[in-house]
Amino acid sequence: MLEQGQGGLSTRGIVISAVLAAIAIFLGASRLGFIPMPTGINATIMHVPAIVGGILEGPVVGGIIGTIFGLYSFFYATTPMFKDPIVAIVPRIFIGVFAAWTYVAARRAGREWSAITLAAIVGTATNTVLVLGLGVARHYLPSRVAWAVGLTHGIPEIIVAVIISLAVLLSWKRVQKREARARV
Amino acid sequence: MNEFELLRNITIGQYLPTGSYLHRMDPRAKIVAMIFMVAAVSFAPTILGNACLLAACLLIVWLGRIPLGYAFRGLIPAIPVLALLALMQLLFLGRNYDPASPVVFRWGWIVVTAAVGRLVLVSAARFVELLIVTSVFTLTTRTTELTHGIESLLRPLRRLRVPGHELALVVTIAIRFVPTLALEAERLMKAQASRGGRFDGSRWRVVDRARRLLPIVVPLFTYALRRGEELIVAMEARAYTGGAGRTAYATLQGAPRDWLAPAAALAFCVGMLRAPFPF
């Protein structure tokens, strides 16, 4: 079907951004997107829609999903660090953008699954590093605490994000190519 | 069965109709005023400046005729986190933050300088002020007004290829899709539970909890993408071509007095950032 371009955002871009942003909002609002950790701080998978959007439709869509996720997290934050727009919104814009660029670069060099894995790692690391980095720069966190949180939460978040991105994208790409079939 | 009731527990942008000046204000003016207030709060570095901002925030609550309980609803659950943040700042920042500042308290390796004390107060005040500004904004603005406002504000940027209409549509569809996703997630959770799946568990069994999430989250993504594909076909079948040349049934008609609020917020923002407060 012919794609209708409008101001740099196609109908596909609009709809995919919207449904994936809706997943990010839903994961936050329902608390399903938080995984409680022994440290008392929750790990999150709310950034995964931005990674999936970036891989499927490119950096613009990834950036839009990340921005909506950031705005939601700013408006409904219950902690001082995420009630600061510089920490809550700015880092989230780049999650999908960096994931998309990584996916395009890695896809040229390798297989589909390795490109998705790399993009999910870069997207999640972008979120963790930028949020904690800006948290330190805005004096919400001492750097020692930021390092500890980054290591204890960043790594589990990366693992979960890679598993979800791989499961979603590999199955979705099979559906699109009409390779997926019911087994019963 | 409460754990499966996702739809009932999800609220996005609770609107509290009191018919105040803020409720009747043009959403474009309200968005601009909110951005200036958020900027002023985010960058005000002094205690006196934040005291002025706190007074301004209380004035906003009064202007919106919002009961104080609503405006401060998010504050009580956040008090333990605020206390933890203050403790971390007092214990760990020490001389690393503004080494020239005089020491006001010393006990063993714990050093508290005047600058750190000020930072603790400013961080807490900033949280309270931002909580009030965002609460009042969501309590006085309907989501439809918000999307119309975004679209109208971004219209002049169309020449720079910023797709204002399309971005507003993204927000509209996203908000519309959340209840649909909640219903589907409820269905998935019930399907998993009927087959023996569980979603609770100890905080210490992280891998287990993450693994239990996958049978819900992965089908939810696939469902959303499939619904998205249907919507794309529906929109293209109706010859949707974006915002260019499009007219709207309801147009925003702001009165000049609506723009008093953003003008006052801008003046406040500049004043807060440039005023030479002593502390």
Image: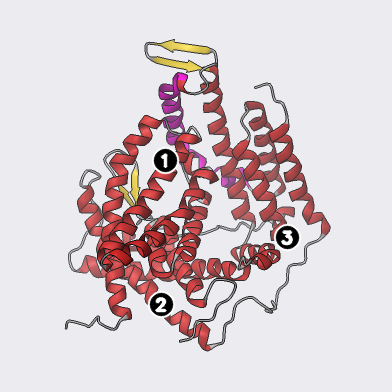
On residue B227, which mark appears?
Answer: 2
Q: Which residue is mark 1?
A: A132
The answer to whether one can see residue B217 in this image is no
User: Mark 2 to mark 3: distance in Å?
Assistant: 34 Å
Q: Which percent across, then down, holds residue B200?
A: 25, 53
Q: Which residue is mark 3?
A: B26
Residue drawn at the location 64% of the way across and 32% of the way down: B50
Dots 2 and 3 on the same chain: yes
Q: Nearer the viewer, residue B29 or B185?
A: B29
Q: Amino acid at mark 2?
A: Arg
Kindly state the secondary structure of the residue where label 2 is placed. helix
Vertical comparison of B15 with B72: above or below = below
Query: Is B90 within the magenta?
Result: yes
Q: Nearer the viewer, residue A16 or A59?
A: A59
- The quarter holding residue B122 reads top right
Horizontal side of B183 relative to A82 (left or right) equals left
User: Mark 2 to mark 1: distance in Å?
Assistant: 35 Å
